[in-house]
Image: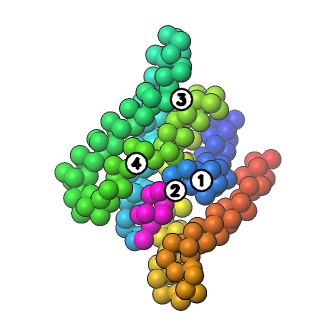
């Protein structure tokens, strides 16, 4: 029961309180670039979630069974980036083969998952936070779901911005950044909720 409680706290915290996009400001490039349409935002969110889970499943054992025993911990970032790049290529091949419309709509942003600092951040934070394998997987799932949630919410906000008439100085990117800041501020309200639920 205690383990279930702990995993639930990790999941909710990574989705809401420590949202990698809106609280930690990682993965901003696809957040701003692919959130114009809901279907693209959902596709990118699901692809990033999948890559986060697979990257964690691959990098956690590499860290603890290969790098640490051989005193190669300093190679972590390079090794993790290579693993993430290979996984993104796998996702790209799968999408191109089975969901070509989504592959075409994601365009250049799909290969950019390789350089998405949110994916690398999750894998490194799992190690730095001392999570075991199961906790790391739950944290990665929560981070991916948080990324998906942020993408979907911001896609809704941007669809409303299309019909808005902002002042001339705020048209385009400025109003998008102001809107992103307001959405990020809204997530700070979750900070005490998770602690309060399990107190």
Residue 196 shows which numbered tag? none
Q: Is 97 situated above or below 152?
A: above
Residue 28 shows which numbered tag? 2
| Mark nearer the viewer, 3 or 4 | 4
Q: CA distance from mark 3 to mark 1?
A: 25 Å
Q: How many other residues sit within 10 Å of disc 1, few (<14), some (14-19) or many (≥20)?
A: some
As helix, strand or loop, the secondary structure at mark 2 comes to helix
What is the number of callouts on the image?
A: 4
Residue placed most toward the observer, 24 or 133? 24
Marks 2,1: beta carbons within 8 A: yes
Q: CA distance from mark 2 to mark 4?
A: 11 Å
Residue 113 shows which numbered tag? 4
Q: Position of residue 172 (x, y in %)?
A: 49, 77
Marks 3,4: beta carbons within 8 A: no
Q: CA distance from mark 4 to mark 1?
A: 15 Å
Residue 133 shows which numbered tag? 3
Give the extent of the magenta segment: 29-36
Residue 25 shows which numbered tag? 1
Reply yes or no: does residue 70 show up in magenta.
Answer: no
Residue 188 seen: yes
Q: How many other residues sit within 10 Å of disc 4, few (<14), some (14-19) or many (≥20)?
A: many
**Dot 2 or dot 4, earlier in sequence:** 2
Residue placed most toward the observer, 108 or 134? 108
Residue 135 seen: no
**Dot 3 or dot 4, earlier in sequence:** 4
Q: Could you tell me what secondary structure mostly forms the magenta stretch?
A: helix
Q: Is residue 199 left or right of residue 178?
A: right
User: Which residue is located at x 61 percent, y 58 percent?
Assistant: 22
């Amino acid at each position: 029961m205690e383990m279930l409680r702990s995993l639930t706290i990790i999941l909710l915290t990574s989705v809401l309180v420590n949202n990698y996009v809106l609280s930690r400001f990682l993965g901003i490039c696809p957040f701003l670039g692919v959130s114009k349409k809901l279907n693209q935002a959902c596709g990118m969110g699901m692809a990033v979630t999948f890559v986060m889970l697979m990257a964690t499943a691959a990098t956690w054992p590499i860290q603890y069974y290969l790098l640490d025993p051989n005193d190669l911990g300093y190679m972590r970032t390079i090794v993790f980036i290579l693993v993430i790049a290979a996984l993104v290529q796998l996702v790209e091949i799968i999408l191109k083969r089975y969901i070509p419309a989504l592959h075409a709509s994601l365009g250049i942003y799909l290969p950019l998952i390789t350089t998405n600092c949110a994916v690398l951040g999750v894998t490194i934070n799992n190690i730095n936070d001392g999570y075991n394998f199961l906790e790391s997987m739950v944290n990665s799932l929560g981070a991916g779901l948080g990324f998906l949630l942020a993408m979907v919410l911001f896609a809704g906000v941007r669809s409303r911005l299309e019909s808005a008439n902002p002042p001339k100085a705020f048209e385009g990117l400025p109003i998008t950044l102001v809107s992103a800041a307001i959405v990020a501020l809204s997530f700070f309200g979750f900070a005490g909720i998770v602690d309060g639920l399990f107190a």
